[in-house]
Image (cartoon, grey):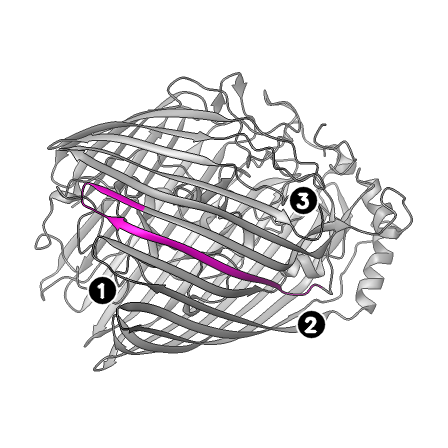
Amino acid sequence: MAFNTRGRAMLLASLSFAPLHPVLAQDTPERNITEQDRPGQDRPRRTPDDPILIDRIVVSAVRPDRAAPISEDEMAMPEQIALPADATAIAARVPGGAFFGNGTLSGQLSYRGLAGERVLGRINGQRFATGGPNAMDPPFHYAPSVLVERIDVARGIAPVAQGPSLAGAVNVQLFETDFADGPDLSADLRFTSQYRSVDDSYAVGGMAGVSNDRWRFGVLASREEGEDYEFPGGTAAGTSFERNLYGAHAGFRTGAGELFLEYRRSETDPTGNPPFFLDIVFFDTDFLQGGFRGEIADDVELTLRLGHVAVRHLMDNQTTRDPAAPPDRARATFADADTSTAELAVRIGKANSYLQVGADAELTDKSVTITNPFNDGFFVESQPDVQAERIGAFAQWRGAAGQVEFELGARVDSTDQSAGEPQLGAAVPMGPRGLAAAFAAADRETRQTTVDAILRSWLPLGDITPRLTLARKERVASLLERFGWLPTEASFGLADGNIYVGNPDLAPETAWIAEIGFDLDAGAFSLRPTAFYRRVDDFIQGVPFDETIGVIDSPVEMIAAMSGDPTPLQFGNVDAELFGIDMDFAVRTVDRIEVSGTAGFVRGKRRDADDNLYRIPPANLRLSGAYRGDGFSFGAEVFAAAGQDEVSAFNEEEPSESFAVVGLFARYDLARGLAIEAGVENLFDEFYAPHLAGRNRFGASDVPLFERLPGPGRGVWARLTGRF
């Protein structure tokens, strides 16, 4: 089967902790700097430690709130990989994580088989709506890896205090200047620079800040650029990228609290997206947030956060697409997304025994207009002024019953969604005009209420801690899934070549979740396995538009057929289940030598049909071995994935083959706070195509059309990092 045998393809035109094992920690020689040398390490209220609830990946040299080392000899683990431009690939290294390869800057995180809007993604604690209707800018598109300090992943499910989310929650923390310990000003300088040969890319980023015990101020910036990457067999065309980011942040300490403010500007320039019909021309995005966090009385903490994110986006099939689409099929799509957020929470009690109550609101306004750059009379508002207004409230109780500790929480959210009337140009044919008129005459507003409830419990028994999680989580359909009236390939990044249309009658997804596992830390050996089951009622995915599949007897099917897909899909509710097991582990039986890794397996099935869910990652294993000396470290890492043959027949998903890729890495400490790192990726120049990789749609590429994009070939990388 090819990519489009059924004709669906378009024609070409917070809590956090340092993990138990260093495979999740990628830091530089900051380990030699004492707590007295580091200014401003007294902000525990931003990141209280709780290893039961959160996985942490430390990316930079900075570990501002680590209370204990990740290994007994307090040596830092060297970096195992070249920092990818897409921070999602780093987050995917947690147990249960996987990576949708939709483009160099457009990857999506899959967590225990769920992806897209089902996984809550935030940057510096701020949630927002992406701008691209095909998720060319998922949340971590705006987090250059060279500026990432750490990535916190809620283990299994997101706490109700973080907002609605069907699966886990991930927060990326960028560099930020801390308060100093005294009244004298202290400087804080951090930087990362990297070169990678496989795509001839460079990245440089850093932060400069000053602070004392009452004020802090910092600026940060990064620049990244890369060419098409090489693989065994040629060049993957359309994978070049270019991105800039700059911003500033400030804080003022008032007693035990802090007033804070931050602003960032992200500018993505022409960047290829081979799995999609269009490529990025630009993303110009502004982030602004501020508020207060800290104690307002003894054992009473207040968090107030206000934020706004504005995304401005253009994508087309002319700027980087090779060959460019002919004039009659040329498209340039403009998309805007504005998100305003407000959060208020009060916590009463101690760090491990408290009651927290709060409320939050999220207002989203999006629009998408499709144009033809060669015809001023052709424009279609495929998402006309679509809006979502969500207001929620929650209560979360952390306590103990005897020796058993627990976190119990519940939240309720009310979401209003609406759409405007689409405007069309004079050159738009009658088919879309008829659909637009029908959409304008229909009810374009809906309100739904969702309820989440979670219970996470654990029993500390010395070296071993059994744990159990039970939860009910819900997700309201996205604006695209509900109001996408025009049949297009927009699917929020599924990149399956199908044409989709929205469904205003979608019910919320409801997941019933059970997880059981334990944390074992016996010094020389650590192990953290988790078995999980998710039963999802009203799971949203594409279903046949009508019962007469392949018979073109409706305006939607007629328009889809004109674009090359006579069997369009409509977003609909089905029933699904996901189950599996994942773990991380470390062995430290020999002085200075450690073997560590992660492993995972997940299975996704439909319960209402004899089929599997689409784009479920195969079983995988990541294994790293390292020697850590005084000022010099080196090691090797292997990542292996099994073949995936439990694929979705409905989505015509093809099986994938197993593979294993080996890399080498080393680090040398040039001075305190300064290190050079280097490595070799894909040491044996293995050809492999990850199961979750997108399919190529660039004609002028060495990757055949509609085949999975292969992984990078053998290459070397070098990186210089430091903090002063």
The residue tagged 2 is 446
Relative horizontal placement of residue 112, taking residue 422 as reference (left or right): left
User: Residue 284 versus residue 581: which sits nearer the camera?
Assistant: 581
The residue drawn where x is 46% and y is 62% is 127
Q: Are marks 1 and 3 in contact (CB under 8 Å)?
A: no
Residue 44, which numbered label?
A: 1
What range is drawn magenta here? 506-527
Residue type at mark 3 is Ala
Query: At numbered mark 2, what does the secondary structure look like: helix, strand or loop?
Result: strand
Can residue 562 be seen here? Answer: yes
The residue drawn where x is 70% and y is 31% is 3
Residue 630 spot, x, y in % from top left: 10, 33
Residue type at mark 1 is Pro
Residue 332, which numbered label?
A: 3
User: Residue 144 versus residue 690: which sits nearer the camera?
Assistant: 690
Q: Are marks 2 and 3 in contact (CB under 8 Å)?
A: no
User: Residue 462 versus residue 220: which sits nearer the camera?
Assistant: 462
Residue type at mark 2 is Thr
Residue 657 spot, x, y in % from top left: 55, 26
Residue 299 spot, x, y in % from top left: 23, 79
Residue 519 within the segment the image draws in magenta: yes
When the figure is inspected, residue 633 is found, relative to residue 538, above or below; the finding is above
When the figure is inspected, residue 349 is found, relative to residue 663, above or below; the finding is below
Query: At numbered mark 1, what does the secondary structure look like: helix, strand or loop?
Result: loop
